[in-house]
Image (cartoon, helix red, strand yellow):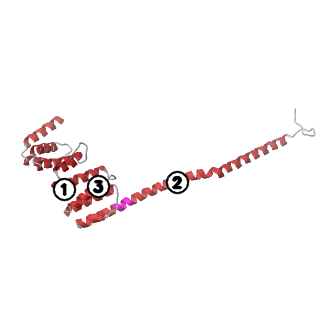
Amino acid sequence: MPLRDKRGGKLREGKMSNSESFIDEVTEEVRKDKLFGYMRKYGWIAVLAVLLIVGGTAYSEFRKAQTTGAAQAVGDEILAALEIDDDEGRAAALQAIDVSGPAAAITGLLTAANLTETDDIAGAVGALEAVALDADAPQVYRDLAVLKSVMVQGDTLSIEDRRALLAGLAMAGGPFRVLAQEQLALISVEAGDIETAVTQFVALAQDAEATRGLRERAFSMIVALGGDIEALVGDIAATDAQDN
């Protein structure tokens, strides 16, 4: 049945279409108003998130640049110190560099080396002990500082104390294992325990991780201590033959 208006006439289809179009437009405007309202209310969150991401990346890059710049500055200071002609001046310049972590360990080791050249053993030992006790320094530098401290102090440090310090360094897997074992062998000579010393030097002469220079020193000590070098050479040859 066709629709009629209040006067009994038919409603025109055009009028109906216009009404629906008007409703759709009003609905769309309401949606837009709500969307803009949400954006005004919560849009700052999205903007803040973008700023945080961009700002965080920029800050990270800034920190990296700062770190790189600081490392380069420290490197320049170390190089400048090493260019000084006299040992005391180099040591003083190295000690004046304000650093921490690995760089501090490096400057400490270099300082100790220069102080040793000036016969300032106490100063050298102090610099080495500072590196050895520095929890922020890499372990390899701390171990090297302990080894150098034992070598620098020599017989001013008791045999027992030197052996105690070297024992940990001489364990398997340590970067300075064979050097620590060489020092232990020399301590055995100092203590008059020649048989133990020869055994220790023989082990070093056969150690695959020992450098050529260290093996040559070991052979020299074996000969000097009256060890059987011919038997040792025969043992090494036999071992090499078995390995091949």
Residue 153 is tagged as 1
* Measured Cα–Cα span from mark 3 to mark 2: 40 Å
Task: Tell me the tag on residue 168.
Answer: none
Judged from the image, the secondary structure of the residue bearing numbered disc 3 is helix
Mark 1 or mark 3: whose residue is earlier in sequence: 3
Q: Quadrant of the C terminus?
A: top left
Q: What kind of element bears circle 1?
A: helix
Amino acid type at image mark 2: Val
Specify start and end residues of the magenta stretch as a single range: 70-74
Question: At 27% across and 65% down in the image, what residue appears?
Answer: 92
* Drawn side of residue 70 relative to residue 210, left or right: right
Q: Tell me if residue 227 comes above or below residue 76 in the rendering.
A: above
Q: Amino acid at mark 1?
A: Gln
Disc 2 designates what residue?
Answer: 54
Which numbered disc, 1 or 2, marks the residue closer to the eye? 1
Name the one closer to the observer, 108 or 219.
Answer: 108
Label 1 close to label 3 by CB (< 8 Å):
no
Between the C-alphas of marks 1 and 3, the distance is: 16 Å
> Mark 3: few, some, or many residues within 10 Å (few <14, many ≥20)?
many
